[in-house]
Image: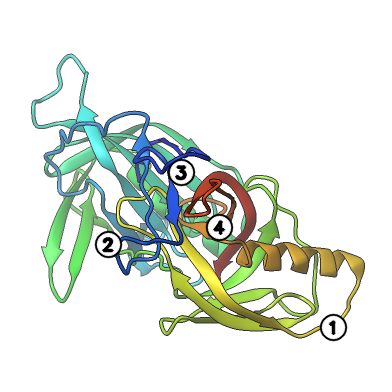
Amino acid sequence: MYIIPTILLLATAAPSSNAHTLLRGNLPTEQQYAATTRSIAPPLPDESNTPLQGTRWTATDLYYEEDDELKPALDDHPATLIFNDYSWPSFEDDADDDIVSLGVDGNTGCNSINGDAAVSPSAFEVSDARMTMKICEDTVMQQETAFRILFQQSVSYELQESESQVLVFKDEEDEVIARFEPLPEPTLESDWVLDGVGESWEREITDTDEPVTLSFNSDGTYSGYGGCNSFNGEYEDVTIEGSFYSMFRTTRFISTKRLCEDEINDQERKVFDALNQEVTAYRLNDPRFDNSGLELLATTVSSDSTKTFQVVNVDGNVLAGFSLA
């Protein structure tokens, strides 16, 4: 997903349309919170002529060359394919007018892989593919080998309609080498398990007897286990359409009061602090990232001398990261 960089200003003067503002006090409407952002750069023009742009997929079947057959993708190690939601004209000298360049990201179930694809309305070929180098169990590595074919040769594709869309890839001999179905968008209202506290690429996690969990429900309640204490409460979504970050605030927070080892208590406090900010910003990362799932971000709040409004600055620092349970 292409993200436009955003400036968020911490202000102590009158609210501005260029600031990320949280209105308090004399509110003009029943809407309690408002947020706006200003982009550093305008969106790139839409040059796409392909139905793949901006789509997200998970594999259902992959072709295993050694066995010469299509096999179901591994449920516990999903293979995903995500196409950027922006494109640009192909600059190859002999490029057809129907061909555009489109970023494509994949996850083999073990490693992340990405590159730039020359895409026509019915075929694409990836160049400059880059891949992480983790070693996983044999069955997952075999799936990875099957998946990588999509990044190693020119393939054709078609979108088929049945009960839902199916993305089918074929090789040069018109043999099916992969089938994909739409990948559901991640939502906050899910069950999450902690995979670390701190910056997104430097997360640390302290082992606990049971996983640290966090669940958000559609009725405005949440609950979880912090590694030492259980907790629950209520929250409200304060995200405004068009804002750069999604946001919520907890309106009620209750936890048990057990004491545990210092390291566990310290980690739990960081999780609780992330939830108990005046406003908690969050992002839901795509499955193609190693740090996938839910990230809770730091915010700061300031108000002007009249106390009639407050300004929220989202600095992007990751306080805690979670994966789907």
Count residues near mark 2 (Cα–Cα under 10 Å), then give few for <14, some for 14-19, many for 20+: many
Residue 2 appears in the rendering: yes
Check disc 3 and report the residue beneath it.
113
> Given the image, on which type of amino acid does mark 3 rest?
Ile
Distance between mark 2 and mark 4 Cα atoms: 31 Å
> Given the image, on which type of amino acid does mark 1 rest?
Arg
136 sits to left or right of 53: right
Residue visible at 76% across and 85% down in the picture: 256
Decide: is 312 above or below 86.
below
Question: Which of these two is toward me, 211 or 82?
Answer: 211
Distance between mark 2 and mark 3 Cα atoms: 18 Å
Residue at disc 1, secondary structure:
loop
Distance between mark 3 and mark 1 Cα atoms: 44 Å
Residue at disc 3, secondary structure:
strand
Find residue 258 and name its label.
Answer: 1
Query: Which mark sits nearer the N-terminus, 3 or 1?
Result: 3
Find residue 179 and name its label.
Answer: 2
